[in-house]
Image (cartoon, grey):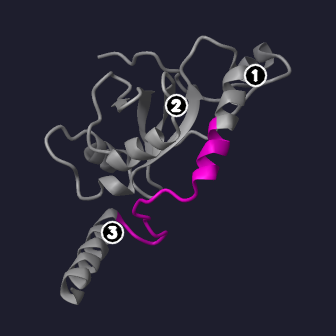
């Protein structure tokens, strides 16, 4: 299925830059899974670039619900530093049950899906960013810089075992 309702990334070309004029917004391209998050009053619908539902990232949906962004559609990337695109896709594309590493996934928002200028969308993102910072830290599992996905699973299982033994 073709990608729907999203901006696509293109390789850098100086000729394209000349066409844009004096102003351009440039963002880091993450190698993750594209995700649109549509904010409704009582739920967040997360969709892949092909329009498939992404159901098992409750930590992200809960954090977005706290922002009170009713009627806003966000465009971003589901990403974990150090994970391959294949690993990320394997985690977020599940339809039946959540992956053991789903809590490690981060949502990097880079646009608002609406018919407005890029300047206005960027200003709106700055307002959302201020709201996010006002919430304080969002609870999710951090992948340590030296860990692979397999190390993380082992660490989480050991931490869970310690919790069970201490009770």
Farthest-out residue, left: 96
Judged by depth in the image, the label closer to the viewer, 2 or 1, is 2
Local SS, label 2: loop
The label on residue 166 is none
Left or right: 108 with respect to 105?
Answer: right
Label 2 belongs to which residue?
69
x and y percentages locating residue 24 in the rendered image: 76, 25
Q: Within the image, what quadrant is residue 158 found in?
A: bottom left
Q: CA distance from mark 2 to mark 1?
A: 33 Å
Label 3 belongs to which residue?
152
- Is 16 part of what is drawn in magenta? no
Judged by depth in the image, the label closer to the viewer, 3 or 2, is 2
Farthest-out residue, right: 22
Asked if residue 111 is positioned above or below residue 97 in the image, the reply reads: above
Local SS, label 3: helix
Q: Quadrant of the C terminus?
A: bottom left
Asked if residue 30 is positioned above or below residue 150 in the image, the reply reads: above
Disc 1 residue crowd, few under 14, some 14–19, many 20+, Cα 10 Å:
few
* Residue range corresponding to the magenta coloring: 128-148
Q: Are marks 3 and 2 in contact (CB under 8 Å)?
A: no
Disc 3 residue crowd, few under 14, some 14–19, many 20+, Cα 10 Å:
some
Label 1 belongs to which residue?
17
Q: Within the image, what quadrant is residue 85 found in?
A: top left
Q: Quadrant of the N terminus?
A: top left
- Mark 3 or mark 1: which comes first in sequence? 1
x and y percentages locating residue 150 in the rendered image: 28, 67
């Amino acid at each position: 299925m073709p990608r729907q309702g999203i901006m696509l990334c293109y390789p850098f070309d100086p000729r394209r830059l000349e066409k844009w004029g004096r102003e351009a917004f440039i963002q880091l391209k993450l190698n993750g899974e594209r995700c649109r998050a549509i904010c409704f009053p009582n739920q967040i619908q997360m969709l892949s670039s092909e329009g498939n539902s992404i159901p098992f990232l409750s930590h992200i949906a809960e954090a977005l619900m706290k922002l009170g962004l009713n009627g806003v559609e966000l465009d971003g990337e589901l990403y974990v530093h150090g994970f391959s695109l294949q690993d990320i896709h394997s985690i977020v594309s599940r339809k039946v049950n959540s992956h053991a590493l789903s809590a490690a996934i981060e949502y990097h928002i880079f646009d608002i899906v609406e018919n407005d200028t890029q300047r206005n969308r960027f200003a709106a993102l700055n307002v959302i960013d201020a709201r996010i910072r006002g919430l304080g830290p969002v609870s999710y599992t951090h992948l340590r810089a030296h860990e692979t996905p397999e190390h993380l699973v082992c660490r989480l299982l050991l931490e869970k075992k310690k919790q069970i033994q201490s009770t």
